Image (cartoon, coloured by chain):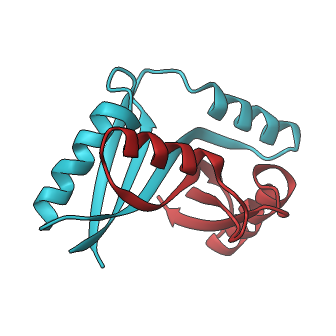
Chain colours: A cyan, B red
């Protein structure tokens, strides 16, 4: 069955996010006052597995082997059946 | 009032996404067969505005002035009141 996977990747608490800091500073220069800026990345794709559980495990494996750095990243997996 | 804004930024249809292509190829090398890989970015922050409509307009302005490149990016704004 075809599944649609979405992995949301963000930095763990306590890890500095220089990209977010830069965005917040640039917004401040344009006179937009914002707080607690953060950035996340989403990777999405389609995969073909027997069931939702297997699909979830497969995507979790991909995250640990390639998509994320477990030392600095937190990730969240969403599996949607098509 | 305090609002929580989330901007989801992706490439427009037809614009090549080399990052997604690389991820898909790397997954294939590890023997994970996936299709239609795509990547998005989320920028989130807090802002203080009178109402939700004003907050939305302000964030839309930020997208057009700084956060997105309207030539290549599509964006989606979500405003949540805290």
Question: Residue B71 appears at what percent x and percent y?
Answer: 85, 63
Res. B2 in view: no
Viewer-side residue, A31 vs B42: B42
Q: Residue at x 77, y 32 (%)?
A: A25
Q: Residue furthest bottom?
A: A82
Q: Is residue B74 left or right of residue B71?
A: left
**Location of residue B47 with respect to B1 vertically, above or below:** above
Quarter of the image where one finds residue A10: top left
Q: Position of residue A55 (x, y in %)?
A: 20, 58
Is there any visible trace of residue A62 in the rendered image?
yes
Looking at the picture, tell me which residue is in the foreground, A9 or A16: A9
> On the picture, is A62 further left or further right than B77?
left
Q: Is residue B58 above or below residue A12?
A: below
On the rendered structure, is A77 left or right of B44?
Answer: left
Q: Residue A45, image x and y in percent?
A: 41, 60
Left-right relation of B73 to A60 = right
Q: Residue at x 75, y 69 (%)?
A: B57
Work out whether residue B69 or residue A65 is closer to the camera in this orientation and state it: A65
The residue sitting at 50% across, 64% down in the picture is: B81
Q: Where in the figure is residue A67, as x and y percent of width and height?
A: 40, 38
Label tally: 0
Asked where in the image residue A21 lies, by quadrant, the reply is top right
Residue B63, picture quadrant: bottom right
């Amino acid at each position: 069955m075809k599944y649609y996977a979405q992995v949301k990747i963000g930095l763990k608490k306590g890890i500095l996010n220089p990209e977010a800091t830069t965005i917040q500073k640039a917004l401040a220069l344009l006179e937009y006052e914002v707080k607690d800026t953060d950035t996340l990345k989403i990777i999405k794709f389609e995969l073909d597995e027997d069931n939702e559980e297997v699909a979830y495990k497969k995507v979790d494996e991909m995250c640990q082997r390639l998509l994320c750095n477990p030392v600095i990243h937190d990730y969240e997996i969403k599996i949607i059946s098509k």
